[in-house]
Amino acid sequence: GNSVTQMEGPVTLSEEAFLTINCTYTATGYPSLFWYVQYPGEGLQLLLKATKADDKGSNKGFEATYRKETTSFHLEKGSVQVSDSAVYFCALPIGSARQLTFGSGTQLTVLP
Amino acid sequence: EAGVTQFPSHSVIEKGQTVTLRCDPISGHDNLYWYRRVMGKEIKFLLHFVKESKQDESGMPNNRFLAERTGGTYSTLKVQPAELEDSGVYFCASSQGISSGNTIYFGEGSWLTVV
């Protein structure tokens, strides 16, 4: 069945550093792929998504490219800010009704 | 437009007690999902409603968990009796449809601590 494997955390970076959080997937076909983010004290928010191979999702300076050759959907940001400190989850659908399966989450802390 | 709302936001109960979590989906969203994240692990799917009907409850951990969606509007998730390992955050989500063009919106979660 469909599954995701996410880079283990936590990750600590200085402000303006480059961020990569790795996510690889196993899937039947080419399902949509998602990155969700949970800021401290808040709920899960959709950060970005890609609905087909070679698509690039982007939002708030974050990007992720759906790469079928490497079955990856790595999250990147060129210059992180303190406000980006949060837990990031990679996800994809596993059921006919698009129930999601999530990666283990990566805690990102950005220091000023 | 109001988002997915969950109540209570935080709950601390003793082992053996009962807790009921409530979720109000976005108005008009037929699809309602429950997920949970325990002990800092990955977020796990629990079940899915379409209107008032349970479509998939394959993720429910055991019979101590009971979910309902009266009239196809709000949903409740009851844990009875609660055990220590039930501690975690319970997320509710809703969507209008299930096609890839539909976004799934999550609530802020209900944080449960069983002591």
Image (tube, rainbow, N blue to C red):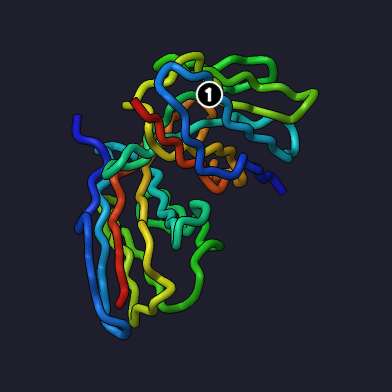
Question: Does B19 appear above or below B33?
Answer: below
Identify the residue shown where x is 72% and y is 39%. A27
Residue A33 seen anywhere in this rendered image of the structure: yes
Identify the residue shown where x is 24% and y is 51%. B6
Indicate left or right for A52 with B45 as reference. Answer: right
Identify the residue shown where x is 34% and y is 73%. B79
Tell which of A48 and A77 is nearer to you. Answer: A77
Q: Position of residue B76 (x, y in %)?
A: 29, 62
Tell which of B56 and A69 is nearer to you. Answer: A69
Residue B2 quadrant: top left
Residue A59 seen anywhere in this rendered image of the structure: no
Tell which of A77 and B64 is nearer to you. Answer: A77
Question: Does A10 appear above or below A67?
Answer: below
Identify the residue shown where x is 22% and y is 59%. B10
Residue A72 quadrant: top right
Residue at the spot of label 1 = A19
Indicate left or right for A44 with B6 as reference. Answer: right
Residue B3 quadrant: top left
Q: Position of residue A23 (x, y in %)?
A: 63, 34
The total number of labels drawn is 1
Which residue type carries mark 1? Leu
Q: Chain of mark 1?
A: A
Q: Position of residue B77 (x, y in %)?
A: 33, 64
Q: Position of residue A56 (x, y in %)?
A: 59, 15
Quadrant for the C terminus of chain A in the image: top left
Question: Does A18 appear above or below A37?
Answer: above
Q: Residues within 10 Å of mark 1 (few under 14, many from 20)?
A: some
